[in-house]
Amino acid sequence: METKFRAAVIGTGAISKEHLSFLAKSEHAHLASVCDLSKAAASYAARRYGADSTYTDYQQMLREVKPDVVHILTPPHTHKQIARDCLQAGVHVFCEKPITPTYDEFKELWTLAQSCARWLIENQNYCFNEQILAIKDIVAEGSIGEIQEIEVRLALDIRSGGPFADENLPNPIHKLPAGAVHDFITHLCSLVVRFLPDFDRVSAAWSNHGGGDLFKYDDLDAIVIAGSKHARIRFSCHALPQCFYVTVRGAKGYVETDLFQPYLRYVKPRGGKLISPLINHFVNGWELMNASFRNFRRKIMQKTPYEGVHRLLDKTYKALTDGNEPPISFEDMERTNRLVNALLMEVNRV
């Protein structure tokens, strides 16, 4: 019988459902423990997903349970210390984004992970959504030509409700360098660097269009330039409805999706110059019609845009089992966190 890796989860917030539901069913992992400052929350999660034990002190959990892998799902300002303690205890770390508030702290953690010979992985789950993997395959086959432009656009009405909007109980995310928007820019940047590995210069406009003291910013409009190639990163609370568009344009065509309402629009040379637009309209119209049925089914089945989390976790545990490289490399994380840092630098602000 194949040995399973003993996994532990620290933090039982909203995202923990995705991690816990994966661990409860995984062929390569066993849910050994759940830890949360709230004993009731830890106990509930353990009962629901079949964990062996619960703790309110993660250091005690590390000593007594001795897990192989820890999933850190706590607020970002706590990640560095918890990850440090886990790595020094000889545990692989899978950490929610942003892995640390700053680029320098990320590099410090990575150096420690290397010295401890343990994995340190940031959850860049949207890079593993089905549509993004399909776009990567299309780019690799060369049918849209050499990449020229990338656009990642996220619209979320985080001011009108939810975890960031309560002025009486401010979310700790507001204390990050970019405030509430910082909770999302790892996703935006990780998608950009998948298709634009490096960059020469960045120009970022940070705004607080809604005003008030709770939000540092509620809007980001940034341009990233790498030679003749460009990327645009856009976050808005005000240009609704909610969407998460990713567009990759090449010299011959383009491909795009909305990760909140998944579809794949794929425009490439199809036939002669005159007839190609008509064929593309027909092919993509058929895809959009089918996508409407698929997305209706997704709503009924209560499927979320987090489907990439399970795929990434499955690849991670399989890589551990087989002794292969992790699905999120140091280069993936370094480029992502370096781009986040560049967006935040005063010298790059307009």
Image (tube, helix red, strand yellow):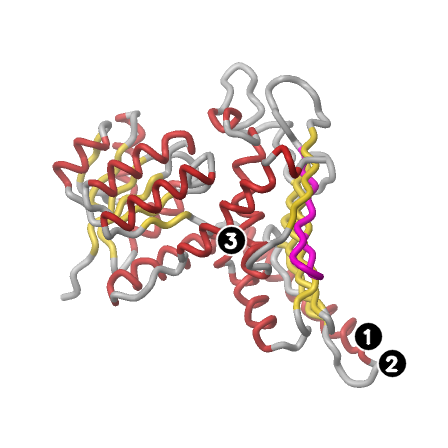
Residue at position x 58%, y 34% in the image: 181
Residue marked by disc 3: 126
Element class at badge 3: helix
The amino acid at mark 2 is Leu
Q: Residues within 10 Å of mark 1 (few under 14, many from 20)?
A: some
Residue at position x 48%, y 59% in the image: 128
> Do the residues bearing badges 1 and 3 touch, measured as CB atoms within 8 Å?
no
Which numbered disc, 1 or 3, marks the residue that appears first in the sequence? 3
Which numbered disc covers residue 223?
none
Element class at badge 1: helix
Closest to the observer: 198 or 221?
198
Which numbered disc, 2 or 3, marks the residue that appears first in the sequence? 3
Residue 32, by quadrant, is top left
Residue at position x 25%, y 48% in the image: 115
User: Is residue 228 one of those drawn in magenta?
Assistant: yes
The amino acid at mark 1 is Pro
Residue marked by disc 2: 274
Q: Residues within 10 Å of mark 2 (few under 14, many from 20)?
A: few
- Relative side of 50 to 211, left or right: left
Q: Between marks 1 and 3, how big is the CA–CA gap?
A: 30 Å
Closest to the observer: 346 or 21?
346
Q: Between marks 1 and 2, how big is the CA–CA gap?
A: 7 Å
Q: Identify whether 7 is placed above or below 164.
A: below
> Do the residues bearing badges 1 and 2 touch, measured as CB atoms within 8 Å?
yes
Residue marked by disc 1: 277
Q: Which quadrant is the C terminus positioned in?
A: top right
Element class at badge 2: loop
The amino acid at mark 3 is Tyr
| Place of residue 96 in the rendered image (x, y in percent of width and height, measured from the top left) | 41, 42
| Place of residue 56 in the rendered image (x, y in percent of width and height, measured from the top left) | 24, 27
Magenta-tinted stretch: 219-231
